[in-house]
Image (tube, rainbow, N blue to C red):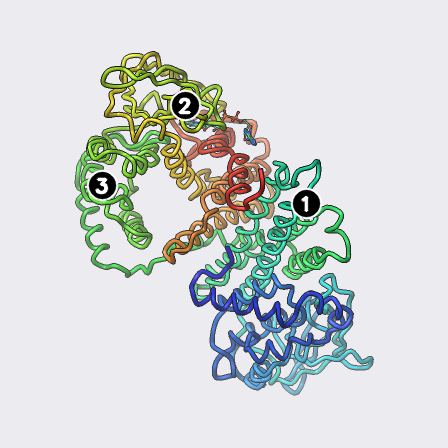
Amino acid sequence: MPLALSDEHRDLAGSVAAWSRRAAPVETTRAHLAGLGAGERPASWPGLVQQGLHALHLPEEHGGAGAGLEELAVVAEQLATELHPGPWLPTVTTSAVLGAATAQGSLPRLLEELAEGATAALVAGPGLRARADETGGWVLDGTSAPALGVPGADLLLVRALAEDGERWFTVRADTRAGTTALVHRDDPTDLTRSVGRLELSAHRVPAADEVTGVDAARVDLVVTTLLAAEASGVARWCLDTAVDHVRTRKQFDRPIGSFQAVQHKAAMMLVRAEIICAAAWDAARAEHHDADQQRLAAAQAGASALPAVVDTAVECISLLGGIGFTWEHDAHLYWRRAVSLASAGGEQARWETALGEAALGATRDFSFVDPDAMPELRAEVAGILAEVAELAEDGRPALGWAPARGGARQARLAEAGLVAPHYPRPWGRDAGPQEQAVIAHEFARAGQAAPSTVIGEWVLPTLLVHGTAEQQQRFAEPTLRGEIFWCQLFSEPGAGSDLAGLSTRARKVEGGWVLSGQKVWNSMAHEADWGVCLARTDTEAPKHEGISYFLVDMRSAGVDVRPLRQATGMSEFNEVFLDDVFVPDECLVAAPGEGWRLAVTTLANERLSMGAHLSHGSSDRVRDLLADPAHPAPRAEVVRVLGRCVGREMSLSALNLRSVLARISQLDLGAEISVQKVFNAVAQRDNSRDLLTVLGPRGLVAVPPDGGHGDPSTDSRIDPVIDHLGLPSVLFGGGTIEIQLNVIARRVLRLPR
Ligand SMILES: Cc1cc2nc3c(=O)[nH]c(=O)nc-3n(C[C@H](O)[C@H](O)[C@H](O)COP(=O)(O)OP(=O)(O)OC[C@H]3O[C@@H](n4cnc5c(N)ncnc54)[C@H](O)[C@@H]3O)c2cc1C
């Protein structure tokens, strides 16, 4: 899904893409590469200016359209998908910085010049120095780092180091020898744009050309947002091109897109493209947030989107094979642009460190409702929570996988529809995303945790859609009150990923069914009151059609639960033997043979809840290391690891928020659940591994959790090594990464079998 979510942004994206395709087709760009590299403007520039795409963000009083970074990011993504050539990116980056500076001296006139179509670039580098001269102006010296758009720019914005810190100046430069502001042309990596350095030799700048009021956090935000937005456009082209190719290219008498190795690469490209897009989108929206938030979002775009676009481009070339490496194929032009974007952002380590430092003082805000929105709902929920706080906590509090057990507090919350507010009434409140967010906010404000029914969260949605009124009446309320606790009896020794290969049988008898077979890896079955169980009711029917969905009383005769000890040393899952277990007719959900359809609903809810947030708190543990003065790892390295861990958490939150907002706008994302689940698993694995890299010899010690009850996926106090050993719960639960990649490849990318 592209960056644009609102109707207005999607219209803008559509018109920019169509215009760019017409005005600057890649064949035309190819024919002018030498000139473009030297800084010539493409023939499309006057049209771009006429449409105002260069001045969308400039203040209206200076000739712009008064829009913001979000609109610029939407345009950047589309222009990059079309490989639009020339100085647009460096020009709007520079003018977005200038547009927010103090409008004094020559700046107002320069902004008008930019609004009329002048081009610009931003130059910096450790070698650039500024000293005050006797007239109140400045003298600049030194050579900048290579920067996009310098050759051919009408105006350069120069960041130089003065005695008292950084200062900014506007400079007009030239390529002719003898000038004090000399432009050197470099051979550009991205052949569609110029690159060069500025050499300043005692170059005098009048006081009026000093730019004041430039905010460093905003500069980083503008730069990384626009680079990441272009990266998103490039990643999208790479994905679409690779997918189109593997659908039709045949080897071994099959389309190569039918090979699983190829499918998984393509599916991971989609996941990466979504991460890049989410980072760019989040950075753009941070324009409206405070400086701490901007620092987090800018660093995240720099740390996650920019390196990822290079990987995506290389993967595209690898799926195209030899043809992708030829000059004739456009892939290398996008590859070159990807490398150029990543390089323009500076060193990855810088952004990871910046993110780690920023995360020590602030957390990125992913809330999407105004704190004062829905005052009546807020007051009502706050009132109920105050009432709940006064009640005795007579149930068992939630512990790891084990949900809270009954008690007056949960009963009151269930009665008020606050345990699962999104469920239909009377079980919930039919709450849409905004209402849910307001309710969650009130829980946080009251310092109370919303109770979880754990596996009940996957079971109840299935029952509320497919169960009879009697089944809903019998199970929904007690589950929400914490009086019934569920387990899921799906997997079998011979049926894990291929769940439909299950062999547990259900035989029809008078008044019900008799179940026989063995289930395995069943979380918390040793504590559960009821289990949802898949069993085969028709052995003649095709694999997916003979399965039925039963509700099994775990205390029934013939149910034998045997706990299994896991790699962590804890016992949370079990094997469950069903030996002629009688299940009455009223505990069959839907008709016989409809079990597979129901299982898909249950698994979708499992994936949704497992994909929505990172449950391994690796970043908290990295923070613990930073807070421990005795920990021997170098601080800089630990901060960088923190940046990486927080970055992955932010990616997941941004993906999640985008999917919520898309749902509010009635957009069908299709892939969202599987993309989130894959990224969740990959992120938790990588965070956990990164944590180990700075744990050092502390990793020799693995302290078992008290009582064997703690859950590595949710208990933040758990030992970091035990936490790492608990990774399989996120890598396998709800379907393995490979199975999710299969789903993305076949259902979303529509790759052939
Ligand atoms: C902590 C934990 C809790 C669990 N809780 C429950 C529970 O409560 N209830 C329940 O019913 N189950 C539960 N499970 C089981 C879980 O759903 C299965 O482990 C999972 O579906 C994988 O099945 P498997 O273990 O048999 O591995 P297999 O299916 O044998 O897979 C082994 C490897 O082969 C790969 N593979 C298999 N098929 C393919 C394919 N077509 N393409 C590519 N790769 C493939 C897998 O990705 C994996 O890497 C739990 C598992 C764990 C780890």
Tell me the distance, in whole angstroms, between the alpha carbons under discs 3 and 1: 52 Å
Residue 249 numbered mark, or none: 1
Residue identifier under label 3: 427
Graded by Cα atoms within 10 Å as few (under 14), some (14 to 19) or many (20 or more), the crowding at tag 3 reads many
Query: Does mark 2's beta carbon lie closer than 8 Å to ligand 1?
Result: yes
Res 394 seen here: no
Q: Is residue 169 left or right of residue 618?
A: right
Q: Position of residue 530 (x, y in %)?
A: 29, 24
Q: Which of marks 2 and 1 is in front?
A: 1
Q: Mark 2 points at which residue?
A: 573
Q: Is mark 3 on a helix, strand or loop?
A: loop
Could you say where residue 447 lies in the image, as x and y percent from the top left? 29, 46
Of residue 47 and residue 56, the one placed in the foreground of this image is 47
Which residue appears at 27% of the width and 17% of the height? Answer: 555
Decide which of 206, 339 is in the foreground and name it. Answer: 339
How far is the residue under mark 3 from the one under mark 2? 29 Å
Q: Earlier in the sequence, mark 3 or mark 2?
A: 3
